[in-house]
Image (tube, coloured by chain):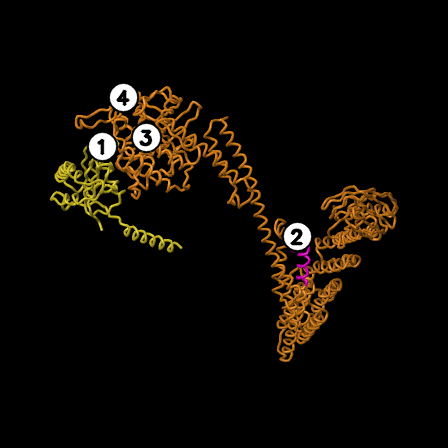
């Protein structure tokens, strides 16, 4: 089943843990897939399948180190080429507003409890999707890969390969 | 995780700086890449911006595949350049976010000992070094990378005197826990056998570093670790030291900045951050030491491992080496290892010696493996041949064995005997020798031969006999013992068949004649037609006396009927004359035929039946030469030379016959004499050359008409005369070929009971040869009959044993080149070769005409 566009975020202000991904609560992506999006968003705010907003924030770790790192929020799995310029601009503005909301969000999260894994699911990102600007968006080709999908795909590929070999023989 | 694939032959050491977030990994790497003050040990470090053979990926960086080495390297370069730029501005580099693939950097370290180490370092988020998220995919991926490294440099920051030490203690604990988990996933086992260096980073926090006196800093480090209250680093030190094998752990004081100052920012006045007090150059301390130590330890470990592996793989025992393959790959690995070290260095010499040792062992093992393989194959072949031979032996003794079974075994025996010498080597010694296989093959063939011939002789049916004889010849061809008989049967049958055909043919013609006579309605043309059929037998050569007489009688009958018909028609005399002429020509009585023609001509003056008569004369002229030539040929074939000449003379002296010949025909007839002379000369010479005796030679010399080869005949006769008289002959025992061993062999040769050659203390070697053993001179005729006896014994430790004995009888001249075997069947064991000298050379009798 093809998924819809989602909001993803990364912050370096995850308390003692440093960097954490903040994801919608019902998202079933692997961390490596999330990382793939956010890695690209850190370099460039627009890609074929995402739009992102970044700003620099201070990170303070328990050892006293204070560094400046990148905080990112992005709309992933959207077919950017299919968006009009106006709509794109509206989405950018929305994302920047959400960046401003991060201070509040980060303050709300109990990092000691929720930050123990690299991905932190939050309903806020689901709620933030529920606005007019982010409805009926054109979808890019992202399929949620679950283990079941992987198994089915693997079995089908294996069958096709086997039939092909039998045909050759 | 594979190291960077570079075209250079030098090894690339892969190290990981293992540290928590904000421990200073990026700062250390940036400092290594920046301009710093000189290292007290003289070590240097240079950042490699563009490694050879590692091209920048195409397209925008955000589209690069992060799993490729090139992408990781060039992303790393961008990241480090950014960090360096920030440091130059007095700002700390940004934190590494959590990423699936680390960033890579390549550095060249050099030492005053002229070593260059290419070291690859990875940069990543220290937040992944957290025991709490060990299950995370990225954390696991990072652990896998680190476990594949050549060494680990663990980074633990020194405590800041002005900052609460508790968070640092927690960090040390987490680092320790994370390291233990990392160790748990290591494939080598609980004790790590690679270098682990602990870099106490940010050393400038607790020491006013004297960059010219590194020993002092190490003393301070020892004091710090031994200080009370105990620093959290002590536990980490013990954990790390106990986790690795001996000599693979060391602690280093390190400072990327060398000195620092605490600064605040307007945005966060309550927070103070550390900044380098000087950049360009950075006053770094001890940056290179840990890496170089780790690289050198890596070398030592690799040499030790190589040495252990060489010791293990040099053994010939497969259960020790645990491999059936010779260690050529290990030798090549050794070459690569040796290339790390400078020429002439102790390490290089040591490795080269090990390489020599393992190369030799590999070669020896290759030879041994080959021999073992061959032995296994040989043994398998012996087993297989043993089974096959048993089946052969069973059939050999089985009277009920069929021809097809015998054939199958024959084929096996034949292939066994004919096979190349390298096949059935072992079988020849332990199962069946080649000579025995040949003997058995012959026995089988003879038996099958007899089996197939028996029905031929037993059947009474002629047709069946021919069929069986043909089948026999199909199976055995020219090799069959009864091939001549079988061929004779078939030839006889075919000849009989031809005779029978002619007989039936003549019978049918006789029946036709009888039928014609009974009807009494026939013309001369009918008779002529029958005569034509009668003269054209289906098998002209299959004509015995009986058939010839029958044919003759029928021809005479036809002639009589023609005469009778002619009488009726008033032409009796001509017909009688004509048939008489034909009969004379059939009987080759050419003179009489010529006389008859002449008489007719004279009597009738050529007027009666002139046309017919001229036809007869033409017929005579046409056929006379061939008839005479045929008669001459028959006489020559039966060697009746006089009769052959007489045929020619009779023809030439007959005026009436000659009158009917052309000049050419006459000349041809006269030439027949020369032809007869030639054939007689050849015949007599061939007899002389075949028998080579006085009678035949004299016969030629005296009676040959042409005497073309007289000289050769005279030469040979002269030779015979010479050898008929006694001459001085030297008989030499040219060689003895031995089939057994004896250190002290003794041989005696006697000729007609008289000892002529005796020799002892001859050294005999199996398959060896003793040459020019001895000789004897005597006088005798070459044609004399003589008896030669040879006896060989061996004087061994246990007494005298017999080696062989043999006798031979023949003419003295046949001693030349005589090969006398002294085994029981004269086929193998010891044999002697004799030669004669002083004998006249037998002249050649060339082919007639040469």
Q: Quadrant of the C terminus of chain B?
A: top right
Circle 1 marks a residue in which chain?
A
Mark 4 in CB contact with mark 1 (< 8 angstroms): no
CA–CA distance in space, label 1 to label 2 = 89 Å
Q: Residue B324: where, in percent of width, then height?
A: 52, 45
Q: Residue B227: where, in percent of width, then height?
A: 34, 28
Q: Quadrant of residue B436?
A: bottom right
- In this rendering, is residue B621 above or below B515? above
Q: Residue B510: where, in percent of width, then height?
A: 66, 75
Front in this rendered view, residue A1 or B272: B272
**Which numbered circle lies on residue B229?**
3
Both labels 2 and 4 in a single chain:
yes
Both labels 2 and 3 in a single chain:
yes
Mark 2 in CB contact with mark 4 (< 8 angstroms): no
Label 1 CA crowd tier, 10 Å (few <14, some 14–19, many 20+): many
Q: Which element carries disc 1, helix, strand or loop?
A: strand
Q: Which residue is mark 1?
A: A60
Front in this rendered view, residue B444 or B570: B444
**Which numbered circle lies on residue B277?**
4
**Chain identifier matching the yellow colour in the rendered picture:** A
């Amino acid at each position: 089943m093809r998924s819809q566009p989602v909001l993803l975020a990364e912050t370096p202000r995850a308390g003692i843990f440093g960097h954490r991904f903040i994801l919608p609560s019902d998202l079933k992506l692997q961390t490596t897939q999330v990382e793939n999006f956010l890695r690209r968003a850190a370099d460039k705010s627009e890609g074929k399948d995402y739009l992102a907003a970044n700003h620099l924030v201070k990170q303070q770790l328990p050892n006293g180190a204070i560094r400046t790192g990148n905080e990112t929020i992005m709309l992933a799995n959207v077919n950017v080429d299919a968006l009009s310029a106006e709509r794109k601009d509206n989405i950018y503005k929305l994302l920047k507003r959400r960046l401003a909301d991060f201070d509040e969000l980060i303050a709300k999260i109990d990092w000691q409890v929720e930050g123990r894994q690299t991905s932190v699911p939050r309903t806020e990102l689901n709620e933030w999707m529920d606005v007019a600007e982010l409805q009926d968006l054109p979808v890019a080709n992202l399929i949620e890969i679950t283990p079941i999908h992987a198994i089915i795909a693997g079995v089908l590929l294996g069958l096709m390969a086997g039939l092909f070999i039998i045909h050759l023989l | 995780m594979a190291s960077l694939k570079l075209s250079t032959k030098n090894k690339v050491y892969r190290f990981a700086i293992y540290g928590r977030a904000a421990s200073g990994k990026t700062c250390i790497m940036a400092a290594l890449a920046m301009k710093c003050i000189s290292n007290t040990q003289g070590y240097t470090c240079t950042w490699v911006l563009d490694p050879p053979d590692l091209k920048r990926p195409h397209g925008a960086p955000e589209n690069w595949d992060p799993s490729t080495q090139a992408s990781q390297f060039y992303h790393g370069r961008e990241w480090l350049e950014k960090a360096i730029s920030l440091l130059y501005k007095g700002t700390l580099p940004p934190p590494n976010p959590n990423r699936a693939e680390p960033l890579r950097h390549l550095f060249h370290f050099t030492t005053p000992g002229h070593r260059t180490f290419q070291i690859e370092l990875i940069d990543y988020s220290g937040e992944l070094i957290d025991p709490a998220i060990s299950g995370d995919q990225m954390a696991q991926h990072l652990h896998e990378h680190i476990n594949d490294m050549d060494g680990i440099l663990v980074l633990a920051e020194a405590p800041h005197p002005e900052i609460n030490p508790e968070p640092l203690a927690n960090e040390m604990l987490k680092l320790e826990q994370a390291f233990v988990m990392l160790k748990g996933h290591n494939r080598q086992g609980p004790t790590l056998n690679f270098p682990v260096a602990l870099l106490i980073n940010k050393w400038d926090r607790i020491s006013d570093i004297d960059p010219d006196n590194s020993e002092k800093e190490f003393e301070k480090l020892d004091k710090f670790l031994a200080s009370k209250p105990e620093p959290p680093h002590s536990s980490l030190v013990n954990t790390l030291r106990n986790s690795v094998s001996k000599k693979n752990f060391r602690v280093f004081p390190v400072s990327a900045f060398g000195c620092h100052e605490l600064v605040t920012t307007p945005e966060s006045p309550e927070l103070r951050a550390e900044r380098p007090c000087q950049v360009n150059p950075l006053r770094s301390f001890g940056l290179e030491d840990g890496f170089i130590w780790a690289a050198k330890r890596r070398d030592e470990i690799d040499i030790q491992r190589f040495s252990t592996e060489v010791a293990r793989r040099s053994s010939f025992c497969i259960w020790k080496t645990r491999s059936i393959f010779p260690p050529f790959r290990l030798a090549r690995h050794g070459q690569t290892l040796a290339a790390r070290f400078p020429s002439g260095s102790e390490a290089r010499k040591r490795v080269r010696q090990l390489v020599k040792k393992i190369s030799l062992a590999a070669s020896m093992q290759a030879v041994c493996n080959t021999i073992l393989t061959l032995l296994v194959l040989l043994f398998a072949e012996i087993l297989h041949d043993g089974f096959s031979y048993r089946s052969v032996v069973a059939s050999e003794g089985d009277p009920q064995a069929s021809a097809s079974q015998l054939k199958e075994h024959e084929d096996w025996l034949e292939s066994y005997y004919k096979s190349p010498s390298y096949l059935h080597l072992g079988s020849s010694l332990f199962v069946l020798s080649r000579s025995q296989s040949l003997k058995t093959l012959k026995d089988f063939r003879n038996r099958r031969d007899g089996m197939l011939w028996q029905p031929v002789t037993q059947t009474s049916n002629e047709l069946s006999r021919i069929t069986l004889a043909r089948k026999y010849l199909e199976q055995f061809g020219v090799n069959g013992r009864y091939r001549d008989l079988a061929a004779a049967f078939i030839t006889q049958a075919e000849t009989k068949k031809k005779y029978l055909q002619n007989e039936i043919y003549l019978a049918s013609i006789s029946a036709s004649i009888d039928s014609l006579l009974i009807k009494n309605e026939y013309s001369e043309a009918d008779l002529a037609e029958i005569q034509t059929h009668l003269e054209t037998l289906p098998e002209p050569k299959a004509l015995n006396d009986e058939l010839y007489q029958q044919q003759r009688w029928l021809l005479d009958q036809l002639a009589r009927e023609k005469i009778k018909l002619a009488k009726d028609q008033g032409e009796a005399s001509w017909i009688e004359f004509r048939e008489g002429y034909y009969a004379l020509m059939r009987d080759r009585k050419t003179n009489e035929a010529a006389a008859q023609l002449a008489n007719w001509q004279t009597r009738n003056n050529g007027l009666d039946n002139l046309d017919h008569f001229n036809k007869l004369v033409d017929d005579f002229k046409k056929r006379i030469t061939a008839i005479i030539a045929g008669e001459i040929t028959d006489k020559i074939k039966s060697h009746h030379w006089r009769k052959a000449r007489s045929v020619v003379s009779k023809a030439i002296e007959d005026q009436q016959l000659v009158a009917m010949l052309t000049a050419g025909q006459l000349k041809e007839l006269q030439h027949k004499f020369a032809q007869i002379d030639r054939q007689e000369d050849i015949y007599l010479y061939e007899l002389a050359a075949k028998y080579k005796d006085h009678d035949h030679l004299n016969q030629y010399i005296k009676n040959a008409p042409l005497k073309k080869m007289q000289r050769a005949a005279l030469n040979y006769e002269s030779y015979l005369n010479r050898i008929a008289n006694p001459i001085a002959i030297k008989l030499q025992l040219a060689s003895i070929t031995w089939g057994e061993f004896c250190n002290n062999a003794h041989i005696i040769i006697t000729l007609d009971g008289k000892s002529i050659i005796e020799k002892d203390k001859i050294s005999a070697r199996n398959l060896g040869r003793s040459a020019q053993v001895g000789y004897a001179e005597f006088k005798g005729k070459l044609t004399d009959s003589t008896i030669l006896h040879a006896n060989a014994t061996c004087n061994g430790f246990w007494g005298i044993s017999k080696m062989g004995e043999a006798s031979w009888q023949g003419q003295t001249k046949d001693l030349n080149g005589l090969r006398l075997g002294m085994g029981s069947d004269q086929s193998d064991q010891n044999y002697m070769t004799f030669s004669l000298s002083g004998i006249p050379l037998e002249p050649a009798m060339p082919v007639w005409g040469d």
